[in-house]
Amino acid sequence: MTDEQKTRIFRMREQGMSYDAIAESLSLSKNTVKSYCRRNNLSGRRKQESDDAKPAEFCPNCGKPVRQIPGRKHIRFCSSACRQEWWNSHLDQVNRKAVYEYTCAYCGRHFTAYGNSHRKYCSHACYIADRFGGDPHE
């Protein structure tokens, strides 16, 4: 790839042209253009500078800024670890829709479980006792 092609790729990406259009106009492969753009921070959609830009959003767990990528799903947390930590510490705010009420097939105790609509036993001990016999609380 020549220096002229590199500068043309840069200008075309600044104008918002796609990898396919650039590759076709410069007689290069799409993957060559794409990898060059990725190495030089020209990949993705180019951000339009404007006065009415959205204020930065921050992770509710750690407070780090969260970068939103245009055209993708809105993200709330900076990482999966932050998301898990926040949800585990704010269980009262979790809207659990799949909570089921059961009666244990072995001991007859009433219990609730989240996410499993076919559960039969209140604990592993009751399952073992019912399946293999014996007292589950020994």
Image (cartoon, helix red, strand yellow):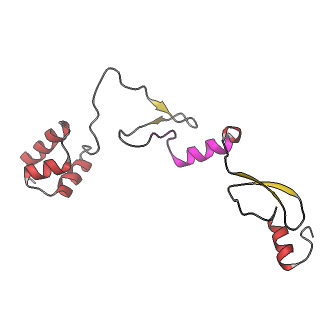
Q: Residue 53 at what x, y percent from top left?
A: 36, 25
Vertically, is 112 above or below 77? below
Q: Taking 96 as reference, is 48 left or right?
A: left
- Residue shown at the point (11%, 56%) measured from the top left: 28
Q: Is residue 34 left or right of residue 73?
A: left
Residue 59 picture location, percent across and down: 52, 36
Q: How many marks?
A: 0
- Magenta span: predominant SS is helix
Image point 42% across, 37% down: which residue?
67
- In the rendered view of the protein, which quadrant contains the N terminus? bottom left
Q: Is residue 102 left or right of residue 23?
A: right
Percent from the top left, x then y, of residue 48? 27, 30
Q: Quadrant of residue 131?
A: bottom right
- Residue lying at 84% horizontally and 63% vertically, measured from the top left: 104
- Residue toward you, 92 or 42: 92
The image quadrant of residue 14 is: top left
In the image, farthest residue toward the bottom = 132
Region of the chain picked out in magenta, as a range: 74-89
Q: Is residue 85 magenta?
A: yes
The residue furthest top is: 51
Give the x, y percent position of residue 10.
Answer: 16, 41
Q: Is residue 102 above or below residue 60?
A: below
Q: Quadrant of residue 47?
A: top left
- Image quadrant occupied by the C terminus: bottom right
Residue at screen point 18% across, 42% down: 17
Q: Is residue 77 magenta?
A: yes
Instruction: Using residue 76 as the reference point, say whether residue 5 is left or right of it.
Output: left
